[in-house]
Image (cartoon, rainbow, N blue to C red):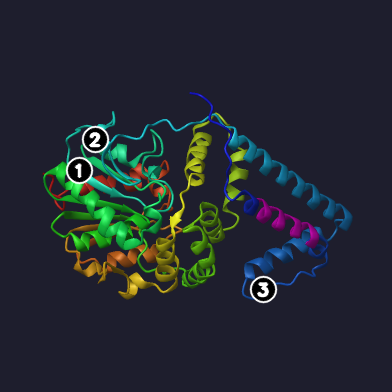
Amino acid sequence: MTSSPPRTGPRPLPVHLATALGTWMSSYAASPLWKTGSLPSNPNAPEIARRSANLRTHLAEVPTEAFVGAVQRAVADRHARLIDAIHRYRNHPYTRDVADPPAVWRAGTTVLRDYGAVPEARDPAGPPLLCVPSLINRAYVLDLKADASLLRFLAARGWRPLLVDWDAPGPVERGFDVTAYVAGRLEAALDAACDCAGAAVPVLGYCMGGTLAIALAQRRPRDVTALTLLATPWDFHAGQPEQGPLLGQAGRALEPLLQLQGELPVETLQMLFAGLDPHTAVRKFLAFARMDPDSARARAFVALEDWLNDGVPLAAPVARTCMVDWYGANAPARGAWRVAGRPVDPAEVRCPALVLAPSGDRIVPPASAQAAGAVLPRAATHTPALGHIGMVTSRRAPSAVWTPLAEWLDGGLVRRT
């Protein structure tokens, strides 16, 4: 295995470093107040008030200068460990250990990858399964590495996953709106999948790809035999009602950028994701600093970080729909989202459906994903105890998600032809 060139992540690096330093330096600046009890307490956070009181008790006999010095050393040590972890990540020898399978169809920058052709496939001519990832980030999160690949797992069970690989928008796709992606590219990919099958096919959608797949299943009922939704948002104000309006406002504020560039840049997307939990990257990299760099855990960390940092921009019309219409106005749940002029209504999707809404999801709150199951007429909903990405990449994913998903596809609800 050869070393890859030094990486540039985690993206956006200035935001992650500023968050870490801002938090730690504010702790240092306020450290004299911790001893004197001058820090304000939030009456709505009794646990924080209790811990603050305990801290003052323990520090009562500690000289202020000694305590402030200890905090200063702790900040410097933590910052050094973070920088070292980022350096180790950037120079880690891991490279992705699987190759993308061949394409059976393409249009513009979009290709349909055939997982019946991978070495793990039990039956290259098995029943096709159309897999629709999000337009945000790369499609290979469903095929991250040899021992973390939902698609190769399904291929080994006899299915023939066909992955819609959107890639980055090209000159044509930069003008696409959601209708162009659903009624144009996605329906054409469905045609190609049905040609491979000689019949209708089941459809699997992950994250935003599931939202698009709901519209596809409604538009093409004769060609979709079943619908599986993994961490798919539908009610964008459920679970975290304050988040949707904030992202809607951010979308409107970014309008000059969208007009100027014709797309929402990767760094801006990454910054919006970081805003969901600004300290996530810092916690992850401090944990990585404690790992054996040759361990399976470290390789899994690097593989996932490589995918997270390998983002793609979002076409401006799609960005407006996602941020302003979906998050801001909650158009899907209100019946106001339209594709080619037709309201997208899950109640019209009559095929069997499986909704997997992970309980630890901080990107798509479980209530948002469960909302799709509540309106799909023939849906079963399950809430595996995993996160948004962990449900398709973690060590627990095969037992908690992949196997139940495969058993559902193999069962009586989906006729394999």
Q: Which residues are magenta?
A: 17-30
Residue 19 painted magenta: yes
Instruction: Give the amino acid at mark 2.
Output: Gly
Q: Which mark is residue 42?
A: 3
Residue at 22% x, 69% y is 347
Give how far across and how far down residue 229 sits, in percent: 30, 56
Name the amino acid type tagged 1.
Pro
Q: In whole angstroms, how far apart are the C-alphas of marks 1 and 3?
A: 56 Å
Q: CA distance from mark 2 to mark 1?
A: 8 Å
Across and down, in percent, residue 134 comes to 37, 53
Q: Which residue is mark 2?
A: 116
At label 3, which amino acid type do we have?
Answer: Asn
Asked if marks 2 and 1 touch (Cβ < 8 Å), the reply is: yes
Q: Mark 3 near mark 2, Cβ–Cβ under 8 Å?
A: no
Q: Residue at x 54, y 27 (%)?
A: 3
Element under label 1?
Answer: strand
Q: Quadrant of residue 364?
A: bottom left
Pick whichever of labels 2 and 1 is earlier in the sequence. Answer: 2
- How would you rate the neighbour count of disc 2 (Cα within 10 Å): few for under 14, some for 14-19, many for 20 or more? many
Q: Which residue of the protein is positioned furthest toward the top in this rendering?
A: 1
Can you say whether 172 is above or below 150 in the image? Answer: below
